[in-house]
Amino acid sequence: MTCVLHDGFGRQVSYLRLSVTDRCDFRCVYCMQEDMQFLPRKDLLSLEELDRLASAFIARGVRKLRLTGGEPLVRKGVMGLIGTLSRHLRSGALDEMTVTTNGTQLARHAAALADSGVRRVNVSLDTLDPVRSRVLTRRGDLGAVLAGIAAAKSAGLHVKLNAVALRDSTEHEIFDLLAFAQQGGHDLSLIETMPLGDTGEDRTAQYLPLDRLRALIAARFTLRASPHRTGGPARYWDVLETGQRIGFITPMSSHFCETCNRVRVSCTGMLYPCLGHEAATDLRAALRGSESDTALHRAIDTGLAAKPRGHEFQAGRLGEPALARHMSVLGG
Ligand code: SAM
Ligand code: SF4
């Protein structure tokens, strides 16, 4: 089967976000509960199954693969998986393979990632303050994250920083984050919190709309809307004085679903055509049920046909989770 993936609204899907684990060494306050129950290991796809699944999507026209989690770099054997998947980069079937990480394991793996053809990594960095970092991650070791970012840069990886916008935190640190990004030559994207899963924290108190943050930046710097697009949800603004470009990802305050080109698969093999809906299709049964990929492709088609027009997050209803699923199930 070679036909490319289209959903029911004519959008072509060329981007797969694959979660390789639900586990993490952090417990970020906007993502997980302090006392998180993780999945039994037998429910997780094996590394071979993850490879087979990603390869099936690539055979159907997926050109960009992002590995995520949980924290992808804590999955045992993940570097072996990345190594085998890199054959699709060498063959030209895949344009890009990237990783979204909290950075704690990057210092160990940066060189091997670069050797496997990974060119870019997204690193989550919400704060540069070690005390605040410990509070936000409930575990965190900011030093390891910063060492990971430095190692990635030394290995020649392009590092994009992602910061979740948080009231009482990002407001005070935005200029430090901007300066850190500029000095390191890193892109920076700011993300609004989404109401996914019970985290044991009040999301209404956490939520900081990005137009507020933009106004704060605009009070010091000249911001100009950038025509730059990556095919993703970010809208970019150039900071004229520093020459930086900042991405604003605003799932709560504005939709970007009409151009959505992506689907997500959890580490248990559930295909989620939309981050903002519970609906999912089981690919694991198809993977495990047969050595041939026929049933797998059929299940992928079923999942794609169910891709909704868009998500329905509402900023006014952050108090309760819109979905029971935690962000760590799909990795954003
Ligand atoms: N552990 C890796 C990391 O932190 O980058 C990958 C998985 S994490 C779930 C992926 C991204 O989702 C991170 O940038 C994180 O900040 C973001 N994230 C987690 N929970 C979120 C939420 N409720 N709303 C918005 N972004 C969230
Ligand atoms: Fe872990 Fe990433 Fe979730 Fe933080 S955002 S708890 S690092 S999965």
Image: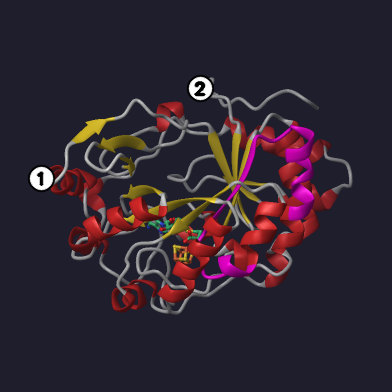
Q: Is residue 238 magenta?
A: no
Q: Which residues are magenta?
A: 83-108
Position of 160 compared to 60: left or right? left
* Residue 207 located left or right of residue 187: left
* Residue at 69% from the left image edge and 71% from the top image edge: 41
Looking at marks 2 and 1 on the same chain, the residue that comes earlier in the sequence is marked by 2
- Counting every numbered tag in the picture gives 2
SS type, badge 2: loop
User: Can residue 117 be seen from the camera position used here?
Assistant: yes
Indicate the amino acid at tag 1.
Ala
Image side of residue 312 versus residue 102, left or right: left
Q: Considering depth in this image, is 188 or 12 the residue closer to the camera?
A: 188
Q: Which residue is mark 1?
A: 219
Tell which residue pokes out farthest to the left in this image. Answer: 219
Residue 312 image point, x, y percent? 35, 40
Is residue 106 magenta-colored? yes
Give the camera-side residue of 266 and 127: 127
Residue 207 in sight here: no
Snapshot quadrant of residue 78: bottom right
Residue position for label 2: 9
In percent of the image, x 17 and y 37: which residue is there? 222
Nearer to us in this view, 136 or 286: 136
Which tag is nearer the camera, tag 2 or tag 1?
Answer: 1
Q: Is residue 207 above or below residue 210?
A: below
The amino acid beneath tag 2 is Phe
Check disc 1 and report its element: helix, strand or loop: loop
- Residue 123 horizontal/vertical position (percent): 47, 57
